[in-house]
Image (spheres, grey):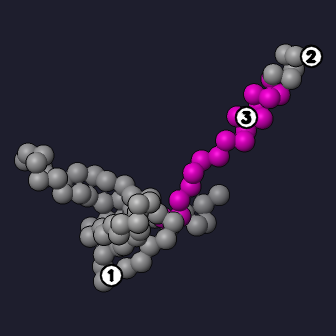
Amino acid sequence: MKTIFNILFLLLILTSCTKNQYRYEIKGKVYVPTSGLNPLHDAIWYADSIHFDGDTICYRNSNGKEVRIKPPYTLIDHKLDK
């Protein structure tokens, strides 16, 4: 009986875990001047809300600072993902 309870408990734990899903995924490049011959590196940002300043994407980071992402970038809206 204890084994059945442990198995059911384990199944409950495994099926109740959810992935933290953000609405927007932004793929772009960041400039790292100290990285040698290729200072541009791939980067991915996740945000729940964004706004635009011309062609620049802006959002508030978890510490309250504004993050500004300049083009080129790819914006993916996960609102309709299932």
Identify the residue under disc 3.
13
Task: Judge whether 57 appears above or below 18 on screen.
Answer: below
Where does residue 7 sit, x and y in percent of width and height? 80, 23
Q: Amino acid at mark 2?
A: Met
- Closer to the chain start, of discs 1 and 3, is 3
In the visual, does 5 lie left or right of 36?
A: right
Task: State the residue at coordinates (40%, 70%).
Answer: 59
**Of helix, strand and loop, which one carries label 1?**
strand
In the visual, does 80 lie left or right of 76?
A: right
Q: Amino acid at mark 1?
A: Asp
Task: Judge whether 8 appears above or below 21 on screen.
Answer: above
**Of helix, strand and loop, which one carries label 3?**
helix
Residue 82 visible somewhere in the drawing: yes
Task: Judge whether 38 appears above or below 65 on screen.
Answer: above
Identify the residue under disc 2.
1
Q: Amino acid at mark 3?
A: Ile
Task: State the residue at coordinates (36%, 59%).
Answer: 27
Task: State the residue at coordinates (33%, 81%).
Answer: 53
Identify the residue under disc 1.
53
| Number of other residues with Cα within 10 Å of mark 3, as a class: few under 14, some 14 to 19, many 20 or more | few
Residue 75 visible somewhere in the drawing: no
For this orientation, the residue located farthest to the right is 1
Write the start and end of the magenta stretch as one range: 7-25
